[in-house]
């Protein structure tokens, strides 16, 4: 039990270093696996950042934010607004980045 307590104390004193190490390791795994486990690794990074007391960075927060869906055209609708075109373009770009 003494070794476990020592490990816990070490972890509590070095939260930021542990979070940085987990982030670096998950980036290396993501690169080696060519993104196959990217979603799972992002969750690990988020948990490590939370443990380290760091908020999610802007890119991760933006990726986790729900995207707005373009309205579904109804039969008989022939005109599309520029807002709908912009939303469709943004949605397509987001899907292209995800693949």
Image (tube, rainbow, N blue to C red):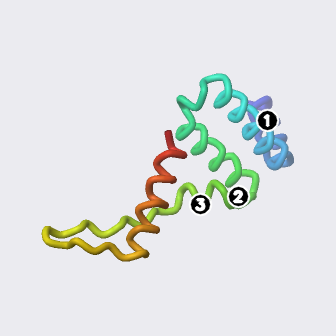
Left or right of residue 56, residue 13 in this image: right
Which quarter of the picture shows residue 31?
top right
Q: Residues at badges 2 and 3 in contact (C-beta under 8 Å)?
A: no
Please give the name of the residue rendered at 60% of the width and 24% of the height, measured from the top-left corner.
33
Name the secondary structure under disc 2: loop
Residue 84 in percent (x, y) is at 38, 71
Name the secondary structure under disc 3: helix
Please give the name of the residue rendered at 63% of the width and 54% of the height, measured from the top-left corner.
60
Residue 65 in percent (x, y) is at 52, 62
| Cα distance in 3D space between marks 2 and 1 | 28 Å
Q: Dot 3, crowdedness within 10 Å: few (<14), some or many (≥20)?
A: few
Which of discs 2 and 3 lies nearer the camera? The answer is 3
Pick whichever, 2 or 59, lies toward us: 59
Which of discs 2 and 1 lies nearer the camera? The answer is 2
Name the secondary structure under disc 1: helix
Q: Which of marks 1 and 2 precedes in the sequence?
A: 1
Mark 1 — residue? 7
Residue 4 in percent (x, y) is at 74, 32
Q: Dot 2, crowdedness within 10 Å: few (<14), some or many (≥20)?
A: few
Residue situated furthest front in the rendering: 78
Which quarter of the picture shows residue 59?
bottom right
| Cα distance in 3D space between marks 3 and 1 | 34 Å
In the rendered image of this protein, does residue 16 appear above or below residue 80? Answer: above
| Cα distance in 3D space between marks 2 and 3 | 9 Å
Residue situated furthest top in the rendering: 32
Mark 2 — residue? 57
Q: Dot 1, crowdedness within 10 Å: few (<14), some or many (≥20)?
A: few
Please give the name of the residue rendered at 60% of the width and 27% of the height, measured from the top-left corner.
34
Q: Which of marks 3 and 2 precedes in the sequence?
A: 2
Mark 3 — residue? 62
Q: Which of marks 1 and 3 precedes in the sequence?
A: 1
Instruction: Look at the image and tell me in which quarter the N terminus lies.
Output: top right
């Amino acid at each position: 039990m003494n070794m476990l307590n020592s490990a816990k104390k070490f972890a509590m004193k070095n939260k930021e270093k542990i979070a940085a190490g987990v982030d670096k390791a998950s980036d290396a795994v993501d690169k080696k696996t060519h993104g196959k486990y990217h979603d799972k690794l992002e969750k690990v990074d988020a948990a490590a950042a939370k443990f380290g007391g760091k908020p999610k960075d802007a890119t991760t927060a933006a990726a986790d934010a729900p995207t707005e869906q373009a309205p579904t055209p109804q039969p008989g609708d022939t005109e599309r607004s520029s807002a709908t075109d912009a939303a469709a373009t943004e949605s397509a770009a987001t899907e292209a980045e995800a693949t």
